[in-house]
Amino acid sequence: MIEAKQISFGVKGKQILQPVDFTTDKEEFVVILGPNGAGKSTLVKLLSSGLKQSSGTISYYGKDLNEWTLDNLSKYRAYMHQESMIASNFTVREVLEMARYRYPETKNQFNKFIMDKIVTELNLHSFLEMEFNFLSGGEKQRVQFGRVLLQLESEGEIQPIKYLFLDEPLNNLDVRYQIELLKYARKFVDDKRGSVIVVMHDINLCYQYADRVLLMQKGKVIMDGRVDEVMNPQILSETYQIELEQIQALDGEVFYRHVSYSSNLLDKSQL
């Protein structure tokens, strides 16, 4: 369980995040949505201990975040940030292996098993021996996603809910790997391995994969609820300051588009 009470963040007299309450006590896929500058990444960094809040408290499993050692906390939460550069010439294999060094008690056999499993599932075999910093942006994202997954893997049947924080993980990924990453993250939740808390910009993918949405604007969480409650086209239009409409396909799938998109198509068809 993560519980944040009235957490805020400011720097040099500028308030970046207004006081926010946030609680998650079950496996769920949470998307933090909102326009640029809304405070999405700041909130994720605070919740994952990447930043120290200016006010308020954060606890994991009832224990204040300040009381956790980094080694222990790293076994229960992992954070994938936007920046992918590594200040050394590590290979992809070495970057992935770093995720396991906080588990000295774990048998090498398990480490090898889980490494092989994730490398195969994320299709990373072809560049395991390549230097990480020579990869494309999308390849780096896939490796970093593998790293955070490896960080949370542990032996034993009974484990508390673990937390996977992803800050704009779809950056630089082509459509195929965007979908594969989100499917894997969704499976992480559905398999009862933990919760995913992700910053995204794509409202259509958000609707497809999220259980819960935090909608942010100007440093505030303006709505927090089920995906079908929050993703009202009128609310989204007001938040993004662009007119959006919700379309339901014959198969029941829901998607959103800019209203002028349909009129542009109509104009072209009449030429």
Image (tube, rainbow, N blue to C red):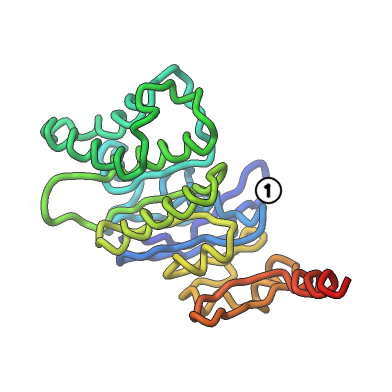
Most extreme residue toward the right is 271
Badge 1 element: strand
**Horizontal and vertical percent position of residue 230:** 55, 75
Query: Which quadrant of the structure image shows residue 35?
Result: bottom right
* Residue closer to the observer: 35 or 21: 35
On the rendered image, what quadrant is the N terminus found in?
bottom left
Q: Look at label 1 and name its amino acid.
A: Lys
On screen, residue 262 above or below 106: below
On screen, residue 64 above or below 206: above
**Horizontal and vertical percent position of residue 237:** 70, 72
Query: Which quadrant of the structure image shows residue 245?
Result: bottom right
Left-right relation of 197 to 168: left
Left-right relation of 120 to 238: left
On the rendered image, what quadrant is the C terminus found in?
bottom right
**Horizontal and vertical percent position of residue 127:** 39, 28
Left-right relation of 146 to 238: left
* Residue closer to the observer: 71 or 134: 134
Most extreme residue toward the top is 89
- Which residue in the protein does label 1 denote? 14
Q: Residue at x 52, y 63 (%)?
A: 205
On screen, residue 112 above or below 26: above
Q: How many marks?
A: 1
Left-right relation of 101 to 259: left
Q: Residue at x 48, y 62 (%)?
A: 31
**Horizontal and vertical percent position of residue 8:** 54, 55
* Residue closer to the observer: 193 or 38: 193
Within 10 Å of disc 1 (Cα), the crowding (few <14, some 14-19, many 20+) is few
Q: Residue at x 12, y 33 (%)?
A: 109
